[in-house]
Protein backbone atom coordinates (compact mmCIF):
# COMPACT_ATOMS: atom_id res chain seq x y z
CA UNK A 1 0.00 0.00 0.00
CA UNK A 2 1.40 3.36 -1.03
CA UNK A 3 2.06 6.15 1.44
CA UNK A 4 -0.64 8.28 -0.24
CA UNK A 5 -3.29 5.59 0.37
CA UNK A 6 -2.14 5.31 3.98
CA UNK A 7 -2.51 9.05 4.45
CA UNK A 8 -6.01 9.04 2.95
CA UNK A 9 -7.07 6.07 5.09
CA UNK A 10 -5.88 7.87 8.22
CA UNK A 11 -8.24 10.77 7.39
CA UNK A 12 -11.32 8.59 6.84
CA UNK A 13 -12.33 8.39 10.56
CA UNK A 14 -12.37 12.20 10.64
CA UNK A 15 -14.82 12.57 7.76
CA UNK A 16 -18.02 12.43 9.91
CA UNK A 17 -16.62 14.97 12.39
CA UNK A 18 -15.46 17.27 9.58
CA UNK A 19 -18.85 17.01 7.87
CA UNK A 20 -20.64 17.87 11.13
CA UNK A 21 -18.26 20.77 11.76
CA UNK A 22 -18.85 22.07 8.25
CA UNK A 23 -22.62 21.84 8.58
CA UNK A 24 -23.04 23.44 11.99
CA UNK A 25 -20.18 25.96 11.93
CA UNK A 26 -18.60 26.76 8.58
CA UNK A 27 -21.83 26.95 6.55
CA UNK A 28 -23.58 29.36 9.00
CA UNK A 29 -20.44 31.47 9.26
CA UNK A 30 -20.19 31.63 5.50
CA UNK A 31 -23.83 32.66 5.24
CA UNK A 32 -23.32 35.34 7.88
CA UNK A 33 -20.34 36.76 6.03
CA UNK A 34 -22.16 36.78 2.69
CA UNK A 35 -25.13 38.55 4.28
CA UNK A 36 -22.87 41.15 5.88
CA UNK A 37 -21.38 42.18 2.50
CA UNK A 38 -24.40 41.74 0.23
CA UNK A 39 -27.25 43.55 1.92
CA UNK A 40 -28.71 45.19 -0.05
CA UNK A 41 -25.90 45.07 -2.62
CA UNK A 42 -22.27 43.96 -2.62
CA UNK A 43 -20.76 46.51 -0.26
CA UNK A 44 -18.59 47.00 2.81
CA UNK A 45 -20.87 49.70 4.17
CA UNK A 46 -21.92 47.54 7.10
CA UNK A 47 -18.30 47.20 8.21
CA UNK A 48 -17.64 50.90 7.70
CA UNK A 49 -20.69 51.75 9.76
CA UNK A 50 -19.32 49.78 12.71
CA UNK A 51 -16.40 52.17 13.06
CA UNK A 52 -18.37 55.37 12.47
CA UNK A 53 -21.70 54.98 14.28
CA UNK A 54 -20.25 56.09 17.63
CA UNK A 55 -21.82 53.14 19.49
CA UNK A 56 -20.17 49.95 18.29
CA UNK A 57 -16.60 50.94 19.14
CA UNK A 58 -17.69 52.10 22.59
CA UNK A 59 -19.40 48.76 23.23
CA UNK A 60 -16.41 46.83 21.88
CA UNK A 61 -14.07 48.79 24.14
CA UNK A 62 -16.31 48.22 27.15
CA UNK A 63 -16.51 44.51 26.34
CA UNK A 64 -12.74 44.17 25.96
CA UNK A 65 -12.14 46.01 29.24
CA UNK A 66 -14.69 43.87 31.08
CA UNK A 67 -13.20 40.68 29.64
CA UNK A 68 -9.70 41.81 30.64
CA UNK A 69 -10.76 42.59 34.23
CA UNK A 70 -12.61 39.26 34.51
CA UNK A 71 -9.55 37.43 33.16
CA UNK A 72 -7.18 39.18 35.57
CA UNK A 73 -9.46 38.51 38.54
CA UNK A 74 -9.84 34.86 37.55
CA UNK A 75 -6.06 34.51 37.24
CA UNK A 76 -5.38 36.12 40.62
CA UNK A 77 -7.94 33.83 42.27
CA UNK A 78 -7.35 30.71 40.20
CA UNK A 79 -3.55 30.49 40.28
CA UNK A 80 -3.24 30.12 44.10
CA UNK A 81 -6.17 27.71 44.11
CA UNK A 82 -4.65 25.55 41.39
CA UNK A 83 -1.28 25.67 43.16
CA UNK A 84 -2.94 24.54 46.39
CA UNK A 85 -4.52 21.63 44.54
CA UNK A 86 -1.05 20.38 43.61
CA UNK A 87 0.22 20.57 47.20
CA UNK A 88 -2.52 18.81 49.19
CA UNK A 89 -3.25 15.12 49.67
CA UNK A 90 -5.15 13.19 46.98
CA UNK A 91 -8.32 13.20 49.09
CA UNK A 92 -8.20 16.96 49.65
CA UNK A 93 -7.36 17.43 45.96
CA UNK A 94 -10.50 15.52 45.02
CA UNK A 95 -12.59 17.77 47.26
CA UNK A 96 -11.06 20.92 45.78
CA UNK A 97 -11.66 19.56 42.27
CA UNK A 98 -15.32 18.87 43.07
CA UNK A 99 -15.66 22.46 44.32
CA UNK A 100 -14.32 23.67 40.95
CA UNK A 101 -16.66 21.39 38.99
CA UNK A 102 -19.83 22.25 40.96
CA UNK A 103 -20.58 25.31 38.75
CA UNK A 104 -20.67 23.00 35.70
CA UNK A 105 -23.38 20.97 37.42
CA UNK A 106 -25.46 24.03 38.24
CA UNK A 107 -27.77 25.81 35.82
CA UNK A 108 -26.36 29.06 34.44
CA UNK A 109 -29.74 30.71 34.98
CA UNK A 110 -29.85 29.55 38.60
CA UNK A 111 -26.41 30.99 39.26
CA UNK A 112 -27.29 34.31 37.68
CA UNK A 113 -30.56 34.63 39.58
CA UNK A 114 -28.60 33.88 42.75
CA UNK A 115 -26.29 36.76 41.90
CA UNK A 116 -29.31 39.00 41.34
CA UNK A 117 -30.46 38.25 44.89
CA UNK A 118 -26.96 38.82 46.28
CA UNK A 119 -26.28 42.09 44.45
CA UNK A 120 -29.74 43.69 44.42
CA UNK A 121 -30.70 46.72 46.53
CA UNK A 122 -31.05 45.58 50.12
CA UNK A 123 -29.22 42.35 49.38
CA UNK A 124 -26.40 40.74 51.37
CA UNK A 125 -23.62 42.67 49.65
CA UNK A 126 -25.22 46.07 50.17
CA UNK A 127 -26.06 45.20 53.78
CA UNK A 128 -22.45 44.13 54.41
CA UNK A 129 -21.15 47.45 53.10
CA UNK A 130 -23.64 49.33 55.28
CA UNK A 131 -22.34 47.48 58.36
CA UNK A 132 -18.86 48.93 57.77
CA UNK A 133 -20.24 52.41 57.13
CA UNK A 134 -20.25 52.44 53.33
CA UNK A 135 -23.68 53.47 52.08
CA UNK A 136 -25.28 53.65 48.64
CA UNK A 137 -23.24 50.80 47.13
CA UNK A 138 -25.07 49.79 43.96
CA UNK A 139 -23.84 46.73 42.06
CA UNK A 140 -26.96 45.29 40.45
CA UNK A 141 -27.48 46.85 37.03
CA UNK A 142 -23.86 48.02 36.80
CA UNK A 143 -20.79 46.81 34.96
CA UNK A 144 -19.08 46.14 38.30
CA UNK A 145 -21.77 43.66 39.27
CA UNK A 146 -21.54 41.99 35.87
CA UNK A 147 -17.76 41.68 36.29
CA UNK A 148 -18.10 40.05 39.72
CA UNK A 149 -20.65 37.51 38.52
CA UNK A 150 -18.71 36.74 35.32
CA UNK A 151 -15.56 36.13 37.35
CA UNK A 152 -17.35 33.47 39.39
CA UNK A 153 -18.73 31.84 36.23
CA UNK A 154 -15.36 31.88 34.44
CA UNK A 155 -13.17 30.84 37.36
CA UNK A 156 -13.32 27.06 36.61
CA UNK A 157 -12.12 27.72 33.06
CA UNK A 158 -9.00 29.28 34.57
CA UNK A 159 -8.40 26.76 37.34
CA UNK A 160 -8.57 23.58 35.25
CA UNK A 161 -5.85 24.47 32.68
CA UNK A 162 -3.67 25.84 35.47
CA UNK A 163 -4.09 22.69 37.55
CA UNK A 164 -3.16 20.52 34.57
CA UNK A 165 0.03 22.50 33.97
CA UNK A 166 1.08 23.06 37.58
CA UNK A 167 0.57 19.41 38.42
CA UNK A 168 3.01 18.34 35.70
CA UNK A 169 5.89 20.52 36.94
CA UNK A 170 8.67 18.52 38.61
CA UNK A 171 9.07 19.73 42.21
CA UNK A 172 12.68 18.57 42.20
CA UNK A 173 13.53 21.64 40.15
CA UNK A 174 12.47 23.86 43.06
CA UNK A 175 14.55 21.75 45.45
CA UNK A 176 17.52 22.09 43.11
CA UNK A 177 17.08 25.86 43.00
CA UNK A 178 16.90 25.97 46.80
CA UNK A 179 20.03 23.83 46.98
CA UNK A 180 21.85 26.30 44.76
CA UNK A 181 21.08 29.11 47.18
CA UNK A 182 17.83 30.57 45.84
CA UNK A 183 15.23 31.84 48.24
CA UNK A 184 11.70 30.34 48.02
CA UNK A 185 10.47 33.48 46.27
CA UNK A 186 13.34 33.52 43.78
CA UNK A 187 12.91 29.79 43.11
CA UNK A 188 9.23 30.33 42.36
CA UNK A 189 9.72 33.24 39.96
CA UNK A 190 12.79 31.87 38.20
CA UNK A 191 11.81 28.19 37.96
CA UNK A 192 8.16 27.49 38.72
CA UNK A 193 6.55 30.55 37.11
CA UNK A 194 8.25 30.19 33.68
CA UNK A 195 7.20 26.55 33.52
CA UNK A 196 3.60 27.47 34.35
CA UNK A 197 3.23 30.15 31.72
CA UNK A 198 1.80 27.72 29.19
CA UNK A 199 -1.11 26.96 31.53
CA UNK A 200 -1.48 30.63 32.40
CA UNK A 201 -1.70 31.56 28.73
CA UNK A 202 -4.21 28.78 28.06
CA UNK A 203 -6.41 29.85 30.96
CA UNK A 204 -6.14 33.54 30.11
CA UNK A 205 -7.10 33.08 26.49
CA UNK A 206 -9.91 30.67 27.33
CA UNK A 207 -11.46 33.03 29.87
CA UNK A 208 -10.90 36.15 27.78
CA UNK A 209 -12.39 34.74 24.57
CA UNK A 210 -15.39 33.31 26.41
CA UNK A 211 -15.93 36.63 28.19
CA UNK A 212 -15.93 38.52 24.89
CA UNK A 213 -19.09 36.74 23.77
CA UNK A 214 -20.78 36.19 27.13
CA UNK A 215 -24.48 37.07 27.03
CA UNK A 216 -26.57 35.65 29.89
CA UNK A 217 -24.85 37.34 32.83
CA UNK A 218 -24.61 40.84 31.26
CA UNK A 219 -28.22 40.59 30.05
CA UNK A 220 -29.58 39.67 33.49
CA UNK A 221 -27.30 41.67 35.79
CA UNK A 222 -26.31 44.59 33.57
CA UNK A 223 -28.19 47.49 32.04
CA UNK A 224 -28.88 48.63 28.45
CA UNK A 225 -26.77 51.73 29.10
CA UNK A 226 -23.73 49.55 29.80
CA UNK A 227 -24.39 46.75 27.34
CA UNK A 228 -21.69 44.46 26.02
CA UNK A 229 -21.17 43.21 22.48
CA UNK A 230 -23.37 40.11 22.86
CA UNK A 231 -26.28 42.31 24.00
CA UNK A 232 -25.71 44.62 21.03
CA UNK A 233 -25.80 41.63 18.69
CA UNK A 234 -29.03 40.40 20.25
CA UNK A 235 -30.58 43.84 19.94
CA UNK A 236 -29.71 44.17 16.26
CA UNK A 237 -31.03 40.72 15.40
CA UNK A 238 -34.18 40.46 17.57
CA UNK A 239 -35.32 44.08 17.86
CA UNK A 240 -33.94 45.93 14.84
CA UNK A 241 -33.88 42.88 12.52
CA UNK A 242 -30.67 44.30 11.04
CA UNK A 243 -29.06 40.96 10.26
CA UNK A 244 -26.45 42.43 7.92
CA UNK A 245 -25.05 44.82 10.55
CA UNK A 246 -25.22 42.10 13.20
CA UNK A 247 -23.35 39.74 10.88
CA UNK A 248 -20.66 42.34 10.26
CA UNK A 249 -20.24 42.87 14.00
CA UNK A 250 -20.10 39.13 14.61
CA UNK A 251 -17.44 38.67 11.95
CA UNK A 252 -15.32 41.45 13.45
CA UNK A 253 -15.52 39.84 16.89
CA UNK A 254 -14.66 36.46 15.34
CA UNK A 255 -11.58 37.86 13.59
CA UNK A 256 -10.41 39.54 16.81
CA UNK A 257 -10.88 36.31 18.74
CA UNK A 258 -9.05 34.19 16.16
CA UNK A 259 -6.21 36.71 16.08
CA UNK A 260 -5.85 36.53 19.85
CA UNK A 261 -5.87 32.73 19.78
CA UNK A 262 -3.17 32.59 17.09
CA UNK A 263 -1.05 35.09 19.02
CA UNK A 264 -1.52 33.16 22.27
CA UNK A 265 -0.50 29.88 20.62
CA UNK A 266 2.71 31.42 19.34
CA UNK A 267 3.57 33.23 22.55
CA UNK A 268 2.55 30.29 24.75
CA UNK A 269 4.68 27.83 22.82
CA UNK A 270 7.64 30.20 22.77
CA UNK A 271 7.34 30.94 26.46
CA UNK A 272 7.09 27.27 27.39
CA UNK A 273 10.14 26.40 25.32
CA UNK A 274 12.13 29.27 26.82
CA UNK A 275 11.16 28.20 30.32
CA UNK A 276 12.22 24.59 29.80
CA UNK A 277 15.52 25.52 28.17
CA UNK A 278 16.33 28.16 30.79
CA UNK A 279 15.75 25.82 33.70
CA UNK A 280 17.73 23.01 32.09
CA UNK A 281 20.87 25.08 31.41
CA UNK A 282 23.72 24.81 33.96
CA UNK A 283 24.57 28.03 35.75
CA UNK A 284 28.07 29.22 36.55
CA UNK A 285 28.64 30.02 40.16
Image: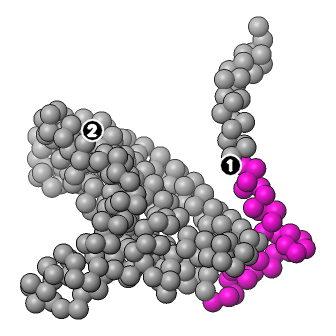
Quarter of the figure with residue 147: bottom left
- N-terminal of the two: label 2 or label 1? 1
Between 236 and 89, the residue placed more toward the observer is 236
Question: Does 153 appear above or below 6?
Answer: below
Q: Residue at x 11, y 52 (%)?
A: 183
Q: Is residue 162 visible?
A: no
Q: Residues within 10 Å of mark 1 (few under 14, many from 20)?
A: few
Whether the magenta-drawn stretch holds residue 33 is answered as yes
Residue 52 image point, x, y percent: 69, 87
Q: Secondary structure at mark 2?
A: loop
Mark linked to residue 167:
2
Residue at image location 68% in from the left, 65% down from the top: 251
Q: Indicate the position of residue 127 as horizontal and vertical percent values.
A: 15, 81
Q: Please give left or right for residue 257 compared with residue 21 in the image.
A: left
Q: Residue visible at 65% across and 62% down?
A: 255
Magenta span covers which residues? 26-54
Judged by its main secondary structure, the magenta piece is: helix
Whole-number angstrom distance, CA of label 2 to CA of label 1: 34 Å
Find the residue positioned furthest to the top.
Answer: 1
Report whether residue 42 is seen. yes
Query: Which residue is depicted at the point 29% across and 79% down?
Result: 120
Measured as percent of width and height from the top left, residue 232 is found at 59, 76
Find disc 1 in the rendering and name its residue.
Answer: 25
Q: Within the magenta stretch, is there residue 236?
A: no
Residue 242 circle label: none
Amino acid sequence: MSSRKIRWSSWLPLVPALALLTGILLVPLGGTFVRSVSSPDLTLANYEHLFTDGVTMTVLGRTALTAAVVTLAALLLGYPYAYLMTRVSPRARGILLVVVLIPFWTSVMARNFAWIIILQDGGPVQSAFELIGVDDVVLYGTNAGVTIAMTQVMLPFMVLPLFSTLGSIDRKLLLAARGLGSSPTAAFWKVFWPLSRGGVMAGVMLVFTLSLGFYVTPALLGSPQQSLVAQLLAQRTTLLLDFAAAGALGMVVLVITLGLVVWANRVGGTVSAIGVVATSQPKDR
